[in-house]
Image (cartoon, rainbow, N blue to C red):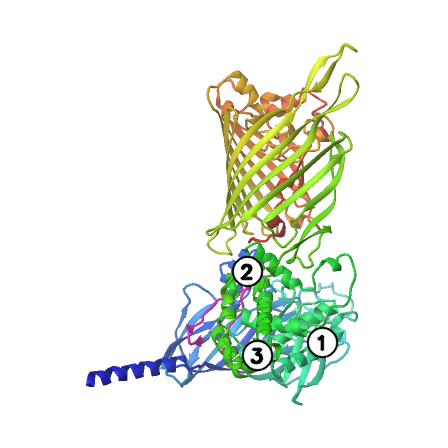
Amino acid sequence: MHRLLLILGCCFLFQSSLFAQSAYWQQEVNYTIDVSLDDREHALNGMMKLQYVNHSPDTLRFIWFHLWPNAFKNDRTAFSDQLLENGKTDFYFSDREKRGYINRLDFRVNNSRIHTEDHPQFIDVIKVWLPEPLAPGAGTSITTPFHVKLPAIFSRTGFKGNAYQIAYWYPRPAVYDRKGWHEMPYLDQGEGYSEFGSFDVRITVPEYFAVAATGDLVMGTYGATGTLKGPPPPAKKKHPFLMEKKPMRKPAAAKPAFKKRAPEKNLIIHDDGTTINDALANAAKDAANAPAQTRTLQFKQSRVHDFAWFANPDFVVEQDTLALPSGRVIKTNVFRLPREKTAWTRAMHMLKKNILHRSELIGEYPYNVVSVVEAPIGFEGGMEYPTITSIASVNGARELNHLIGHEAGHNWFYGVVASNERDHPWMDEGLNTYYDRRTAPKAHDESSFIHNRIPEDQGKIIMTILAKQRSDQPIETHAADFTWVNNAVIPYMKTALWLEKLEKQLGTPLFDSCMRTYFREWQFRHPSPDDFRREMEQTSGQDLGNIFSELNNKGEIDPYTGPKKLKPAFLFNLKDADKVNYINFFPAVGYNTYDKLMAGVIVHNYMPPFQKFRYVLAPLYAFGSKQVNGVGRIGYTFFPQGLNRVEIGVGGARFSTLEGIDSNNNKIFGGYYRFTPQVRVTFRNKTARNSIEHWLEWKTFIIGEQGFRYANSTKDDQFHPYKGKMEQSYINQLTYNITNYRVLYPYDVQLQVQQGNGFYRASATGNYFLNYADGGGLNVRAFAAKFGYLGARTTEKEFRTMRYQPKLTAVRGNEDYTYSNYFIGRNDFDGLGSQQIMMRDGGLKLRTDLFQDLQGRSDNWIASMNFSTSLPLQLFPVPLPIKFFLDLGTYSDAWKKNAATSRFLYVGGIQFSLFKDLLNIYAPLVYSSEFRDNLKTVPEENKFLKKISFSIDIQRLDLRKLTKMPFSL
């Protein structure tokens, strides 16, 4: 019996413990901060006193602090790494003076210095050990001075010229909640999570700055010369340094701004040799270098979890008031830049309207002030902070109204209801976007070709596109784990669509009641997804498990599953794209020197959203050859488990490659057809943010070629061409490709094996790009190939397989044995068409048609290196499409005795790269002596213009490289 009572007692204590642990609590932080802005050094100097109250059931022995200015200290921070992953190099290559940090920290409790410990991974996180354990319910006061070197604007905070955006600028404790500590580095993609408390902040700035900040202004005025409404302060009120391009303190070693003049008649000379002029010059210099007069503003705000402020001498400050539904009156502020013709002149009306709408729908705005600031924030859009938001400069009224509505709307879900945005960004961005859609004005009636083909709900079509091609991610994904594209769409638009589905299930009145209850019960706290679900279920009285489970799923929200119609569409049509399969068509033209002008139509279904069965057909009537040519492809895509995708398809093409006059004086044409069945397997990466793409492809080229034969005609005793029979051949090709699309030092490697009638060919090609700090870079290409015969080596086989043998110098159109490149004139030997080459094999950019022994051709092996570098951007006022190239290579025969050439051949010159490198023009300037000596024997071919060649590299078109997006869509 006693044992039973003991067991029951333990169970009761265990349940009580579980109940105690599950009860909600949160820590409390109260700040008193004095900070001053040094606009010459772009720095802050401050003193912080922090009262930390431990409301947790745990005894704390240390506190993690975020020192987020250190994220801008060097290129080895989590912030810098993430920028590179997202395809941005501006911070990585930034100058030292544009970077930032925080230092001069001295954490103390009761004026006694306390021990700190660096985070093992992040330089912008530090552990502060408490001198004594902090028991539940107890509090402690921590003080520290701090100095912040502000960075240039790369992400949310810093300076641009005389405009300062000061965010994440003070040491602040990480959140400690039911899941433990949330110490985290600063990230560009992924916002914060901070404790609620109060702020009492005194900000000292040079007198000519206007200041906007979180909370109530209790001392001082926003504007530099008082609260302003209308024109900016007169120019004479500005500090002299603001007239300079960069207001920086002159270095001590700088030369005097005033030169000494020779003594003049009646000029007073002092005992030390100086004159009145010297004294005046020095006085002027001292005045220019003297610190500006300052003024101090004080802001106070309770029940917030962050504090941001903005300083700019050019702010036009507009103030007004707004009566909320309860009758309570709040202050509304707009800080804009001094432009007359701008939508910002209507920003006050937009702000008040949006605050009122959300107050009516969700719950009343709880603070006494709300502000909007026009500021350079480092990206398009805006950024929210408690009671204040910054928005980049925009001119369109519609766009500005949307941004003000969204950013000021964050005061509800972020400011008041503050979830962990780093782990659950949808709880802020998604809820906010849902109300954007609820409160957005209806689109104006427009009728235009483009407007009639774009759906009104553009967000839904974007989500459909991502889901159809299996590149979306679940809503419940951590912010840092989203791809760049998904981060801009999933937590915003997909969440909004999910909430609209929830609204539809509950009915709008009940849904609104649930949301108002959620806002009321969780304001000034940190709810989790489970808390949100629990509140919605308790208020609605419904089990919402099924719809909440969708937060963890990929795919569309409520996809259309009915039958789809087929409709033609000129150019494109995206309206009702989930219910209609459009057959898109538009005119097409083509040209080559044999078929001449070709005209036809392109018919395809490659427009989004993604279709598993895809086709593109482009029949073209050739006005020269009087025949129907064209290209086409049909394919089907599978998405098997464990792989990214499997694509099967077949392509085809037909064009002319020869033109001649037969013995009857009729034009005849030779040409080719190509039929290419293929299978490509694209492998899945471990994470969605992985920038590597790797695939394996099997392709068979079935080719028919019709050339000319020549015979002597009895009519004129001349040789004339006549059509030969269609010769068929095949090439089996297996390719493995790996490409890393990272923005810094991207590379690709391709291994390929080809097999045809009597031969095999294996090759490896690698490209590596070395970025320059000022843009551009050096591309390094390496190539190696091995050729061999299947069966016995014979003279007939050597001659027949010559076009398949790798070579060092430029590959011509008649050597494009798979017909994979576009050529103006494949078999031209004079004129523009004869100067076109393709980038294959050794890649030495010199045509050696007349010198077969100098081509570096081999039926064994060849190897080469190709270098091309852009010019330093600072050399010219605008970027020029000019590069220098150097190609060098060797081949097996060059290592034999009595070889026809040196062991190594080279070509160097200037390259012009146009249209995103799709058209490249090469002008060789230096090359091996063998090339130089032989070209001298043919003066007509040795002319500069004759040696120029070009390549049209449409086959290298890559959307991800063009858009510089490291991840697939």
Residue 350 tag number:
1
| Alpha-carbon span between mark 3 and mark 1 | 24 Å
Q: Is residue 256 left or right of residue 91?
A: right
Q: In the rendered structure, which segment of residues is drawn in magenta?
A: 176-201
Q: Look at the picture and state if 185 lies above or below 938.
A: below
Residue at point 55% right, 23% down?
A: 801
Task: Report whether residue 363 is seen.
Answer: yes
Mark 2 residue crowding within 10 angstroms, few (<14) / some (14–19) / many (20+):
many
Classify the position of the N terminus by image quarter.
bottom left
How many labels were placed on the picture? 3
| Alpha-carbon span between mark 3 and mark 2 | 25 Å
Residue 555 tag number:
2
Residue 515 tag number:
3
Mark 3 residue crowding within 10 angstroms, few (<14) / some (14–19) / many (20+):
some
Mark closer to the observer (1, 2): 2
Q: Amino acid at mark 1?
A: Met
Task: Report whether residue 271 is seen.
Answer: no
- Closer to us: 138 or 903: 138
